[in-house]
């Protein structure tokens, strides 16, 4: 303001030049916006993919230029977000039908739920158009999990189950051998045998969250004979099976688990295992592809431990789904097709190295000699675990829901988080298993009630 | 929003006494764009929130957008999680404010006296307030308190407390500690301003009259800085009631619901449960509580200004 007062009359024309400057800027911006939107004429389209922030997606981002060089009419914008934020953003986008994304990575949890609501596109017609896609090559467990009424509603980009990873040298030093199909009792005995002040027996997730602590814990409950709901949607968390399973899990953590279990998730356990702080680790099959040093050299792999029910491994797949609100469905499918094809797997192998190949999606991946050499001991365990994981029959007694380590209902995100918080209190030692299960039962019963009519 | 409005009305009332109505409006005219901006950005979302709070709207349930009357509000009274959240908010706010006022007072007294390196000390003391809450909480959680490689467990290991999982064993105490660390500098600054407006001659006179330091503090210093303490406490509680970032980073509201306060519960209901109706009702109640606290804060603020003006 003071500047204006001091300005001499000679500088009067200044405002006019400012106007021209602004006008020029506006013109420039409009021009840029037009070229950015590709003129809207349909010569070039930009599709937006909301992707989960994991190593496989980072690889995809690197290789996008391979796609755009072949498809010059399609530009791909990839927005990567951490898992929890991705889930929030994508859920809001798809529920409000805003059409901000043309593709997103969703898990086996979302696919059947959203397919039923008509939020995501049935991909079967698109797949049928391309004879080279080979949908029968997809690993059976994954294919079932991503289907609704026998049609695929999302295509898998990355798949995982759970398995037991252990240090052969630590176990051998105490004279412990681990069978290929161990029981939880054998695992607990082994964990207690090798547990010492410098090396803990086993790492199990304790970090609250339905995708963290509750994932391994639910597989334990499943194989102990427990289930979340009976056939009539009555909550069954007050059963002896739940009590046994949770007590077993917490006791194993207390007697032979990692310290600070309440903060330990996938990453924390991976670090502990890689640094030789724990002798065993029950977690996602993808864990093994991140091993370095001694952990990579001396690790053995066993199938998910069991008690009553065989094949207790979980099942998860990050997959590409297409919202019904997308206006560029053909372009989006072209990209999804490319990113989940056999050729993409070979492309990753040759360009970035065979250890980078996204695992757990196609059976043919596991017959590639280069991949077998890179994935070593855990390739076969991964493939068989995924193939045997059945989202429809994961428990001893029949259940009205689908899902292995989750219950495929809208309310489960919140229910799972709340219940796992109660178990976190047990792990921290501030409440008993019984107290936690009483609260968990009440929470689950309230949810079950909404499905009872 | 209520702050701005009450300031506007309070200021306008004084002006209206001396100038005519027309004059007053010409004077207000330049303020109008700002007022409209604030009005649009605060009041429309608020009205929408109130509107949504009467509907049982869940984003995940299609066709759930139905009028529900006062259902969302009655659930506020009957739902146990909400009562826990209110209790946690009260515990958190009261303890953080009480402890940080006491600590802030002590540090302000120290900085008000003639000590060596006062300038550096003051800068260092303010630092916690300038660190981003999320980053601060993360440093506390991982660098200081992590049971495996944290600094505190390492320092305490000679006493047999080496592997204590502080965050999970004492979740509320941890959140309080981090928030006290953050808010002590704020209290210190406000109280220091009060102390520096004190006339040293009064204290000298008291000393001459035979008052010991404790008596001088209780009878002279404390009454003088009392309005400043009140102001700090009220402004502070406005912000501490809304604590969200450090809870998100440190405990995620857990274990159980041990550190879930109203803002965090709102986040859980809105973004884990996607119950927009219920979350709106919680939001409305939170705003009402905040307005109540803010009203007291503003009253204190004005009483200080009036005292200052009379001098």
Image (tube, rainbow, N blue to C red):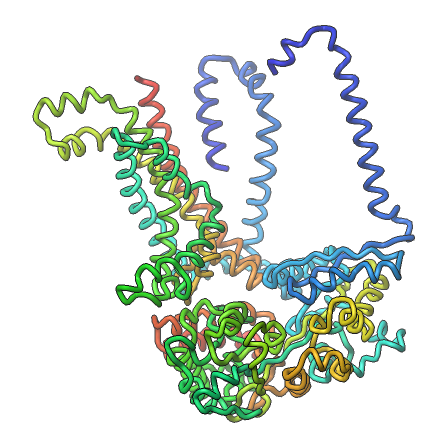
Displayed quadrant of residue B87: bottom left
- In front: A344, or A409? A344
Q: Nearer the viewer, residue A202 or A307?
A: A202
Which residue is at 37% across, 30% downward? B301
Image location (x, y in percent) of residue A430: 34, 70
Q: Is residue A289 above or below residue B37?
A: below
Query: Is residue A391 in view?
Result: no
Residue B48: horizontal and vertical position, in percent? 59, 47
- Vertically, is A374 above or below A46? below
Q: Quadrant of the C terminus of chain B?
A: top left
Residue furthest toward the top?
Answer: A9
Q: Residue at x 45, y 85 (%)?
A: A245
- Seen in the picture, residue B262 relative to B191 is either above or below; the reply is below
Residue A322 visible within the image:
yes
In percent of width and height, residue B268 lies at 51, 60
Q: In this rendering, would A389 be left or right of B285?
A: right
Q: Examine the rendered structure and indicate whether residue A320 appears above or below residue B184.
A: below
Residue beneath the point at 56% across and 81% down? A298
Tell which of A363 and A448 is nearer to you: A363
Q: Nearer the viewer, residue A240 or B27?
A: A240
x, y percentage for residue A127? 84, 74
Disc tally is 0
């Amino acid at each position: 303001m003071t500047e204006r007062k001091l300005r001499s009359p000679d500088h009067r024309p200044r405002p006019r030049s400012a106007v021209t400057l602004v006008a020029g800027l506006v013109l420039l911006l409009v021009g840029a916006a037009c070229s950015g939107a590709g003129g809207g004429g349909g010569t070039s389209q930009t599709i937006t993919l909301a992707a989960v922030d994991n190593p496989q997606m980072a690889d995809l981002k690197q290789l996008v230029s391979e796609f755009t060089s072949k498809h010059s009419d399609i530009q791909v914008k990839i927005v990567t977000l951490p898992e929890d934020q991705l889930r929030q953003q994508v859920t809001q986008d798809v529920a409000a039908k805003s059409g901000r994304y043309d593709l997103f990575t969703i898990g086996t949890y979302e696919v059947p739920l959203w397919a039923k609501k008509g939020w995501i596109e049935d991909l079967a017609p698109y797949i049928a158009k391309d004879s080279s896609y080979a949908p029968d090559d997809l690993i059976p467990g994954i294919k079932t999990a991503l289907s609704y009424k026998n049609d695929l509603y999302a295509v898998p980009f990355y798949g995982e189950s759970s398995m037991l990873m252990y240090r052969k040298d630590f176990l051998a030093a105490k004279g412990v051998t681990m069978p290929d199909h161990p029981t939880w009792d054998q695992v607990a005995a082994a964990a207690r045998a090798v547990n010492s002040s410098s090396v803990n027996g086993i790492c199990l997730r304790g970090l609250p969250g339905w995708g963290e602590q509750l994932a391994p814990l639910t597989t334990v409950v499943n194989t102990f004979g427990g289930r979340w709901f009976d056939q009539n949607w009555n909550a069954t968390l007050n059963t002896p099976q739940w009590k046994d399973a949770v007590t077993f899990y917490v006791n194993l953590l207390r007697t032979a688990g990692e310290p600070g279990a309440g903060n330990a998730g996938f990453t924390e356990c991976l670090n502990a295992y890689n640094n030789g702080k724990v002798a065993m680790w029950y977690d996602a099959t993808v864990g093994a592809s991140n091993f370095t040093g001694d952990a990579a050299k001396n690790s053995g792999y066993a199938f998910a431990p069991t008690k009553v029910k065989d094949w207790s491994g979980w099942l998860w797949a990050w997959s590409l789904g297409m919202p019904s609100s997308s206006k560029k469905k053909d372009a989006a499918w072209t990209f999804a097709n490319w990113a989940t094809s056999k050729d993409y797997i070979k492309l990753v192998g040759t360009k970035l190295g065979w250890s980078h190949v996204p695992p757990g999606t196609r059976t043919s991946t596991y017959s590639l000699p280069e991949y077998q050499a890179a994935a070593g001991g855990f390739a076969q365990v991964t493939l068989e675990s995924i193939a045997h994981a059945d989202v429809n029959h994961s428990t001893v007694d029949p259940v009205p829901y689908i899902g292995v380590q989750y219950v495929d209902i809208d309310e489960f995100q919140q229910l799972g988080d709340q219940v796992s918080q109660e178990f976190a209190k047990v792990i921290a030692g501030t409440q008993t298993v019984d107290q936690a299960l009483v609260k968990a039962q009440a929470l689950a019963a309230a949810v079950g009630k909404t499905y009872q009519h | 929003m209520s702050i701005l409005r009450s300031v506007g009305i309070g200021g306008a009332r004084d002006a209206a006494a001396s100038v005519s109505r027309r004059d007053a409006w010409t004077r207000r005219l330049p303020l109008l764009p700002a007022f409209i901006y604030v009005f649009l950005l605060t009041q429309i979302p608020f009205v929408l929130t109130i509107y949504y709070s009467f509907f049982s709207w869940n984003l995940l349930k299609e066709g759930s957008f139905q009028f529900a009357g006062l259902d969302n509000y009655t659930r506020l009274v009957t739902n146990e999680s909400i009562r826990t959240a209110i209790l946690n908010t009260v515990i958190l706010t009261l303890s953080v404010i009480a402890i940080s006022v006491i600590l802030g007072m002590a540090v302000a007294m120290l900085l008000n006296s003639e000590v060596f390196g006062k300038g550096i000390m003051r800068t260092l003391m303010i630092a916690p307030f300038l660190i981003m809450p999320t980053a601060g909480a993360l440093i506390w959680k991982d660098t200081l308190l992590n049971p495996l490689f944290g600094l505190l467990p390492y320092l305490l290991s000679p006493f047999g407390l080496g592997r204590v999982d502080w965050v999970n064993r004492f979740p509320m105490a941890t959140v309080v500690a981090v928030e006290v660390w953050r808010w002590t500098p704020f209290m210190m600054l406000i109280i220091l301003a009060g102390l520096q407006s004190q006339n040293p001659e009064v204290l000298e006179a008291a000393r001459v009259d035979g008052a010991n330091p404790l008596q001088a503090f209780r009878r002279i210093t404390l009454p003088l800085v009392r309005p400043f303490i009140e102001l700090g406490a009220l402004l502070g509680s406005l912000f501490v009631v809304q604590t969200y970032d450090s809870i998100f980073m440190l405990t995620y509201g857990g274990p159980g619901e041990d550190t879930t306060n109203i803002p965090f519960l709102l986040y859980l209901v809105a973004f884990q449960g996607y119950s927009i109706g219920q979350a709106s009702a919680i939001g409305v109640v939170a705003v009402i509580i905040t307005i109540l606290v803010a009203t007291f804060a503003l009253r204190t603020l004005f009483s200080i200004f009036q005292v200052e003006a009379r001098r």
